[in-house]
Amino acid sequence: MLKGRLEDDRMLTGRGRYVSDWNLPGQLYGHFLRSDRAHAEIVSIDTADALAHPGVAAVFTGADVHGVLKSLPAALPVKGRGGMELINPGRPALAHGRVRFAGDAVALIVAESALAAQDAAELVAVEYRDLPVVVSSADALAPRAPLVHDQVPGNTVLDYESGDEAAARAAFERAARVVKMDVHVSRVVGNPMEPRACLAAFVSDQYHLYTCTQGAAIMRNQLSAVLGVPPESIRVLAEEVGGGFGVRFNLYPEYCAALFAAKKLGRPVKWTGTRSEVFLADEQARDVRSSGELALDDSGRILGMRFDMVSNLGAYLAPTGPFINTIGIVNCLSGVYDVPATYARIRLALTNTAPMAAYRGAGRPIMSYALERLMDHAARELGMDPAEFRRRNFIPKDKFPYKIAAGFEYDCGDFAGVMDKALSSASWKSFNQRKNESEKRGKLRGRGMATYIEATGAGFAPHDQVELRWGDDGTITVYAPTHNHGQGHETTFAQLLSGVLGLPLESFRLRTAGPEFFIAGNATGGSRSLLAVGSVVMLAGREMVKRGLALAAEKLEAAVADIEFAQGEYRIKGTDRKVSMRDLSREGNLDIAYQNKFGATFPNGCHIAEVEVEPETGDTQIVSYIACDDAGNIINHQIVEGQVQGGLTQGAGQVFSELAVYDPESGQLLTGSFMDYAMPRAGLVDGIKLLEYPVPTRLNPLGAKGVGEAGVTGSMPALMNAVVDALQQAGVKQFEMPATPARVWRALQDVRR
Ligand code: MCN
C-alpha cells in the first residue's frame, strides 16, 4: 500500500522549487512602496532621490502604467436585483490619483538588489491629502458614507438576489412561528506559508511570469485582460507553491507591474513579498454579515427561509470577489433542507480595506454558517433536539434530483444516514451526562452540530484539457490545468492512471505550469480537481489504452478483438505474444491530448463538536469532534483525511483565534503580524474523529465529490454552535466569533453583572 504521497519526499528533503527559488540571468529586484494610509488623494510623487540611489534602475508609479496596462478584471455572469449590473470601478496595477487601503501599491522601485530597492523606496516622497475612511460594510452602506470610488453610489457594486421573494414572503405570512438570527462571519487573512512572490520576464515577445498560482490558464487569461495581449503570448510558470487556500487563485497588481517593468527595462524583475505584505495586500476573506430567518409551522417544519447579507469586498474588486459573494454563497442556499420557499439578498459593499475574495470554501462557509447557526438557534427556541429538528426538515433520499430555489440541482445524498452515523459515533444521547461531569469540574460544556452541504466542481473555463506525453525514460508526464499546492494531485492522478494503465505509480510526473506547454482549463479551486480534472485524466488514460490497442494489433499482426490489455501490456489472448505500451510509445504516437468538463457535485456531512469553557479564564477547548462526510467515492483515504483535518483546522482557527481588525478611524490594519493575528496550532484540533459515508455521484466517471473545503464548511458552524451552547447556559444571549479567551471571559462577565 502507498504510504504518504509521491511528492512528500521531494518537498521534505528540500528539493521542491518554490517561487522565490527561481532566478534568471541578469535579473533585477523589485520593491513595492505601499500606501501608509487607508484613503487619500495622491497630490504628488517625487521619485528623483530614489532614482539617484545607487543601484536603482527605475521607479514606476501609477502615472507610468496608466493607459498602458488595463484594469484588473472582475465580472459576474449574472445581474442583480431589478437587472442591476455589477459596477467594476477598476483596479490599476499601481495606485493612480488615489490610494484606497493601507497597503495599496503606489510605486515599484527596481534595482540591482532587493535591499537597494527597499532603501530607495524610503526616498520616494509622496504627498497625500487624506480622505475620510470607511472600513465596515455597515458604515459603507450608511447614508452619506465616504465614497471609496466616486463612480460607485452608496459604495454598493451590486445588489444581488436569489430565490423567490414573493413565495418566501407568503411563507412568512402564514408561519406559526418565525425565528431570526444575525451573524457576522469575521474577516480573516489567508496566510499561506509562502508569501507572494514573482519573477517577471519578457522573452521573445512573450511575457513569462513565475509566481504563486493555483492554475496557470486562469491567471494567463486574467493577465491577458490587463496586458492587452492574447493569452498565447503569456506563460505562467510554477512548480511548488507554498499553499494557496484560494488567495493564490487570482492575479495581483504586483505581478502586472513587475511584467510591465521587465518589458520596459529588458531585464527580468524579481519580487519576494514579506509576511507584512501578506497581511496588508493579499486578498482577505469572509467578512459577511447575515440576517437570517426561518418561517416554521407548528410541527417544526420549515416553510420558508430568508437571508439578508452584506459582503465587505474591500477597496477594489478582486477578480473572483463578486462571484464568490453571490453565486458562491447561494449555490446551496437552503442547505440540506426541503424548503418550499427561499430568498436571499446580498449587497456587495466597498470599503477602505484589502480586497476580499476566495478563501477555502469560497462563499459556501458563509451560507453554511448563517444557516446552521440559525438551525441550532431555532431548535433551542422550539425546545427541540437539534438533530431531530434537522431530521424533520431533511430532503428525503427519494426526492433526488432536488432543485433548490437558487436553481441548482442536488443529484444525490443521504443526509439522515450521514447524521445517524455521526450521532452514534458522538454518543449524542448521553451528552447530558458528560455535561454534568464537566459542570462538576467547574466547566461549561457545549454541543454543536452542523449538517452542511456545499457545491464543488463548478469551474469558469468551458473545458479542462489534459495531455499525457511519454518520455524517453518510460515515464508519462501528465499536463493538467489545476495546480498542485498541497492537495496531493501528483499522487492521486498517478493512482488514477496506474489503475487504468497498470504501470507503477512512480511512472507518472505531473506538470501544471511550464514554458513548454499551453493547455486550457480551470484552476485548483472549488474542490474540483479530482472530480473534474481527475476524471479527465482517467478518461485520457483510457484513450491511451484504446489508441495503443490499434497500434498493438498492427504490431502483433492480430485482430483488435483478439488482443487483451493488462499491466501495461497488450497480449494476443491465450498466447505469450505481447508488446508493452512503453515499446509501442517508442514506435508510434501514444501521446494523448484530451478535454472534457464535469461540473458541480454536492458533498455534505454532519459535524458534531463538544467544547468545554473554563469560565474563570474564558479558555475554550474542543473536547470531542466527529466529522462524518460524504465525498462520494474516495481515491486516496489518507489524503482525504488530511484535507478534512486541514479544512477543519482552518475553520477552528477562524472560530477560536483569527481576526483581521481594521481601526475604524484610520483604516489601519491593527492585526498585521503573527504577534497580533493568532493562527491555529495543531493542539487546537487534537482528537478529531473522521468518518466516511460515501454516496457516489453519477455526475462524473469517478463517482467522486470534492473534499478539499468540506472541513471548513462543516466546522465553522458546528464549533460556534458548541461555544454558543456552552455560553447560553450561563445566560449569554449573543456572541460572535472569534471565541478567544478574552472575548469569552468578557461575555461571561457581562452577564454576571
Ligand atoms: N480526493 C479523493 N477522493 C475524493 C475527493 C478528493 O481522493 N472523493 C483527493 C484528491 O485527489 C486530491 C485531494 O483529495 O488529492 C483534494 O481534492 P479536491 O477535493 O478535488 O480538491 P482540490 O484538489 O481541487 O483542492 C482545492 C481545495 C481548495 S478549493 C482549497 S482553498 C484548499 C484545499 O483544497 N487549499 C489547500 N486544500 C488545501 N490543502 C493544502 N495543503 N493547501 C492548500 O492551499
Image (cartoon, rainbow, N blue to C red):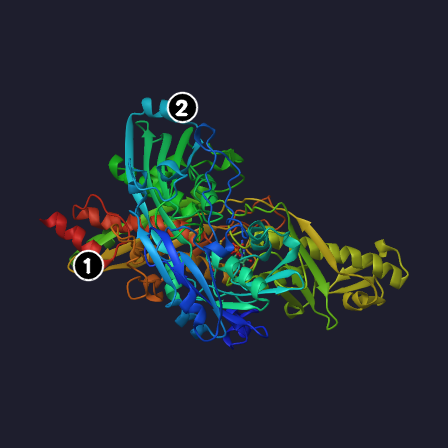
Res 427 visible: no
Decide if residue 442 is in sight here.
yes
* Furthest residue toward left: 753
Q: Residues within 10 Å of mark 1 (few under 14, many from 20)?
A: some
Q: Secondary structure at mark 2?
A: helix
Residue at the outermost bottom position: 13
Q: Which residue is mark 2?
A: 166
Of callouts 2 and 1, which one flags the residue occurring earlier in the amino acid sequence? 2
Whole-percent x, y for residue 505 in the image: 64, 67
Marks 2 and 1 sit apart, C-alpha to C-alpha, by 47 Å
Instruction: Write down the quadrant of residue 259 in the picture.
Output: bottom right
Mark 2 surroundings: few (<14), some (14-19) or many (≥20) residues within 10 A:
few
Image coords of residue 665 (percent x, y): 24, 50
Residue 155: x %, y % from top left: 36, 40
Tag 2 near tag 1, CB within 8 Å:
no
- Foreground mark, 2 or 1, reads 2
